[in-house]
């Protein structure tokens, strides 16, 4: 009987539980055995696991977090870690390992393949949406939803005070969250990797100051800046200081932080996780290996793990242009 | 100067305001004049309108409903209505009319074309997602989100009582909401046009009874049936009665109703509405006519209005199969 | 060692889990043993239970439903039921039984006392807020919150269509939910036991029609009627028909239903449940019996079970007057 | 005809719009004229205002922020500011001024009384709940709700990673938000003014470290510390550093920030604001002066402005004890 192992790894993402549920159901459909390791790759190193049947995954798809727990596992970057993990998999006679996680988790799969003959399948589970080969990653829609509603709340108080807010959102080194949230909240400015060079922020700062001044002269309600994390040297507090020093502009800072990682998954994440989870087991049955299952448009597809990690996945350029050339154009026009 | 008219028509859908905002911004970018008519086509018949500039559309994209109001307009089905609407458009020297609405609204555009020489552009605005040529319609994501969270709440009480619930969701004559919501909530049964023949419900009823009995014998927490509106003869109350009469199964009925039409739009709807709104004005500038702007995958596209109304847009068959053959398979398996 | 038994009974209410958690923590503080029976009183009849320690109640206070399940138990109305329940309690050497539930559950406690010498303590757990001796019952705040946000969504679509909506809310035979929700949503009309005689609805109907007509003449956005369940003969559909027949007024009906029973409890319910749960165990230590623990203002108090069931707990008359005489006065004034 | 002026001042609080609406309705009931000044006291200094009738306050009670805008107004601390404000009030022949705000706003009213003969009435509008004479202030319930749901999300990711989180909540110099939110989320530790001396944090730090170590040894899911703003020297980052340095404990910091000030008001805030708003106008009609309207239990009451500002309003000591002595006792017990 084919035996599948499963773990969730790296930063947790809402929807991981829905993926686990789908994988377990699909295993039962294929008459495969399924076991889950705990705490990411640590569960492989420590041989910490449980068998999974559909009774174990009832009533979990609507909850954030992961019933298998997650963790970073630096030991997988050592030569010894993957070897030990391979031993555990061999001991349990595992045929295929499915890992739900981000690029670090996929690198762990690649490292493992040097020591293990079984199939490895990745599912894209990260709020940052920074894996190529899938339009969206599991958790991204929820993070965007949470950040959007948080900024909706901030907008209330920003409007009441006609105030400038700098709101930092997550995304690691990509602007997917920043642009989705910025456009969804009608942010007056979006500062992200796609339209701002961290090595030379002066032009963006000058433009931002000019836009805020136009806004304030024309007495608009408020000015919300959505800032991608890891972009601005010194972070949002540095930007705040620069606005104050260079133009006497007062602003408030909000760092949305870890609320973006939790919460009941948005329906989009539950559906995506369900589809990808079912397909991961199908891929095992087709003897596929070293792939990530992704979804583009309405098509499920297998992409090489290397491609998922290394290929570029830029934010839609149309969105960047729309934001700057059309939606916030009046902030420039007026200044002329 | 090019002059664009705009109205929202038919059942309102969260995200309509975001579309209005984008159209107005895009008009200013193109240096077009923009006016909005109120109450759907009635605004054309009664010459009720206002000019729209970016100041009018500030701070609206996060709200449900539509600042231009909406309405059904039976007069547009008469020969006289479209003629009168055409006169109003001529009087205001309108070059293009953009209508955000559903299939009835698009039929209104077609009727109008018999009497008017200007360009007509439709944007898909309906929670039902029953227009071909766009993966999603504006409002659909919000309706799915609202219904999903409502059923999450029902699940709590269903679990506490280990009870059967019949939850009716909207969708008119399509199962998009039913299947999205059913899969997102882990519904034990989904009854929709795709898997149930309204003219012969006996097989589905028998299967449903058998599944509920399996569930109850194996002491699962609860059993949620997501039922598409307009499907079951006699509606959810008839289904409840049949479950009681034929198998002594007690159940509770919830009709989610109009909460699915309102509320702050989900970020997906705000983004889709923004993209389609911007593109609608681009289409005017390209002299396009009698089209609907849709989005498939990440591609914006123009489809003939007739196609949007008449072409089939089935629910993904993969989803129907996944629900029945994999995710709820244990309810059948156990009964053998 | 003192041994406490615990069960949740009757209609479930968000916050029951928080009460269970507090009781278990308080038992450990008092060094009492604690066990929970499942499915309300049925757990006593069927001897279905588990021991409860703080590890069992970790991470439950934020969830709706009840980990002990709930159920109605008609057998407790027979003479045999309470006797059997008493036997179970005796077998387990229970010193005190704490029941979280509504008036039916408290009647069960009274019936039990005829056969059992232990202490019985009730906690008010019902969304209907219809128990005297506590300003609020556990679950009430959540039900009000859920219904309020649902009507906020309905308001969007009502405004877009300038439409009349009849929204039925729960409350059994009291108007607490109706008035709280009606005032919180700015409902144009509230129909409840406090201001409407079910035996003679003609005056209210006439007044309602007059108010709607005033509203429509003065072109207000929408008209929302919050209707208490079990009030109007024939229910909301009858009211809808009467509005149509008597005045040609078109309206839409929404029955909010069971979404009001579930969902993550509002913080108010979590806090109330925690306080009452802690105090219930204190009451056991003080040898109190046949009481319900309630909270009035910021004071915890013990009231006789009989009083909690039988004393009147009217909706604040100030609220009824404020709604009719001040907040909706313009709907009458204009008609003069 | 009596003429009432109205403004919102200081940090905005969800529910201010509901108070404005109630005041306007009550003015119409009393046949008083009502005007609103913008931007807090600045509106008085700059004579920026509009007349308010019920048409102006339709459809606002469900929204956060304030339609009258708010602002701090340092000029009211000068001798000249209040004099100028008095002149504006005299110019408009205002009989009474109602201000919705916090202690600074009430001090402004007191300063104004030195120069103005009219009545001044305060309504407690602040998320911090730090005004004596009212159990709750307008905005407090919403802030608690928002922070509670934010921590629920953080709990998901904290559980998945079995991680320590330090979450800073607002409250200025009081622990009302910290204790309400801490208890409502089942926080393992609450650090606030009531149980922690900012001048000597060493005992609390030692205790915290011991509790975290107990938790980690017994493998509980996660450890959430709710920290009141302005308490810990150096803020949450300093606490994080101390945990790391003194005990090698890794933790993550979240500062919830301004999301606590916005958002659709919780029903409790809408109801409180409505009641207090109606009563404020009644107080004018009774010739009351220099009072704040508050609510204790279900009783509306007038308290002197000085008392509202200066009297102590401690967090319920029962809650502090319950948290430390009962709910988190197992974290200490285990360490013995």
Image (cartoon, coloured by chain):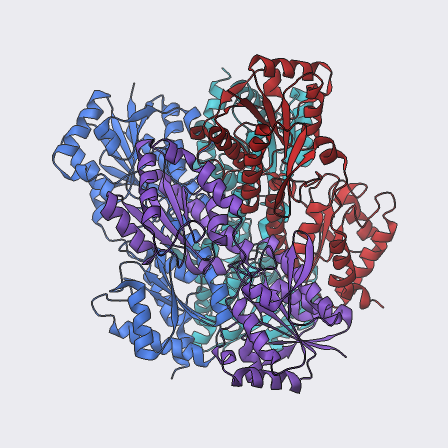
Chain colours: A red, B purple, C blue, D cyan
Residue at 59% x, 61% y: name it.
Answer: B15
Residue at 29% x, 23% y: name it.
Answer: C3
Q: In this view, does C40 lie above or below C1?
A: below
* Residue C120 rendering spot, x and y as whole percentages: 24, 33
The reply to whether residue C137 is in sight is no
Residue A334: image quadrant is bottom right
Residue C20: image quadrant is top left
Q: In this view, does A61 lie above or below B194?
A: above
Q: In this view, does B161 lie to the left or right of B174?
A: left
Q: Which of B284 and D41 is in front in this view?
A: B284
* Residue A117 rendering spot, x and y as whole percentages: 65, 18
Q: Is residue B80 left or right of residue C135?
A: right
* Residue B155 rendering spot, x and y as whole percentages: 40, 43
Residue at far left of view: C79
Q: In this view, does B211 lie to the left or right of C186?
A: left
Instruction: Count how many numbered circles sit on residues in the image.
Output: 0
The reply to whether residue C282 is in sight is yes
């Amino acid at each position: 009987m084919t035996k599948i192992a499963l773990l969730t790894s790296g930063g947790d993402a809402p929807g991981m539980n829905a993926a686990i549920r789908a994988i377990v159901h699909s295993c039962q459909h294929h008459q495969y055995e399924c076991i889950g390791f705990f705490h990411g790759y640590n569960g492989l190193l420590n041989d910490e696991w449980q068998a999974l049947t559909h009774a174990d995954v009832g009533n979990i798809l609507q909850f954030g977090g992961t019933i298998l727990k997650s963790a970073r596992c630096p030991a997988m970057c050592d030569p010894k870690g993957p070897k030990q993990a391979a031993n555990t998999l061999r001991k349990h006679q595992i045929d295929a390992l499915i890992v739900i996680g981000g690029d670090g988790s996929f690198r762990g799969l690649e490292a493992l393949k040097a020591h293990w003959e079984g199939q490895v399948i990745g599912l894209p589970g990260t709020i940052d949406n920074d894996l190529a080969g899938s339009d969206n990653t599991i958790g991204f829609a929820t993070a965007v939803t949470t950040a959007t509603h948080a900024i909706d709340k901030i907008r209330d108080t920003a409007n009441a005070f006609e105030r400038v807010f700098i709101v930092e959102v997550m995304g690691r080194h990509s602007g997917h969250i920043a642009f989705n949230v910025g456009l969804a909240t009608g942010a007056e400015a979006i500062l992200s990797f796609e339209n701002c060079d961290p090595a030379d922020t002066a032009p963006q700062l000058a433009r931002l100051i000019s836009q805020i001044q136009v806004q304030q002269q024309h007495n608009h309600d408020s000015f919300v800046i959505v800032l991608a994390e890891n972009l601005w040297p010194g972070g949002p507090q540095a930007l705040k200081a620069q606005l104050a020093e260079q133009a006497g502009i007062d602003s408030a800072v909000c760092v949305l932080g870890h609320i973006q990682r939790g919460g009941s998954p948005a329906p989009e994440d539950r559906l995506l996780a369900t589809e990808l989870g079912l397909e991961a087991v199908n891929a095992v049955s087709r003897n596929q290996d070293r792939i990530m299952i992704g979804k583009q448009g309405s098509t499920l597809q297998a992409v090489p793990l290397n491609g998922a990690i290394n290929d570029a996945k830029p934010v839609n350029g149309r969105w960047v242009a729309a934001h700057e050339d059309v939606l916030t154009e009046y902030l420039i026009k007026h200044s002329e």
